[in-house]
Amino acid sequence: MAYITIDEKKCKSCYLCINACPKKTIKVGEKTGKTGEKVAEFVDSGQCIGCKSCALVCPDLAITGVYR
C-alpha cells in the first residue's frame, strides 16, 4: 500500500492532482488553503499504487512522500 502527503500550506487548490490520480485517492478536502479554496486531500483507501502522477503534475511541489 502506498500513500502521499499533501502540504496544505503549499497547495493552491488547482486540483491537477485529483485529475491525475488513476485510482481517485485524492479529493477536495474540507480545509481551506492560501487561496481561500478547499485544498486537496489524500484518501487512504488502500488504493494508492504509488505511481507519483499526482506529484508530477503539482506545480507547487505540495505533494511528497509517495511510499509503498
Image: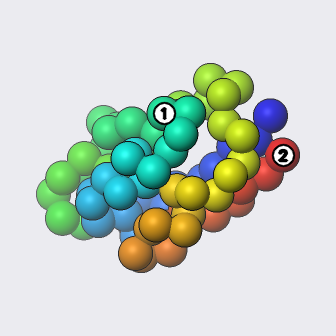
Disc with the residue nearer the chain's start (1 vs 2):
1
SS of the residue at dot 2? loop
What is the quadrant of residue 3 in the picture?
A: top right
Q: Residue furthest right?
A: 68
Is 54 situated left or right of 31 in this image? Answer: right
Pointers 1 and 2 in contact (C-beta within 8 Å): no
SS of the residue at dot 1? loop
Answer few, some or many: residues within 10 Å of disc 1's Cα (few below 14, many 20 plus, some between 14 and 19).
Answer: some
What residue is disc 2 on? 68
What residue is disc 1 on? 24
Is 18 situated left or right of 23 in this image? Answer: left
Is 60 situated left or right of 56 in this image? Answer: left
Q: Residue drawn at (50%, 44%), measured in percent from left and top?
A: 21
C-alpha gap between disc 1 and disc 2: 17 Å
From this viewpoint, is residue 33 visible? no
Q: Is residue 43 above or below residue 11?
A: above
- Measured as percent of width and height from the top left, residue 17 is found at 43, 54
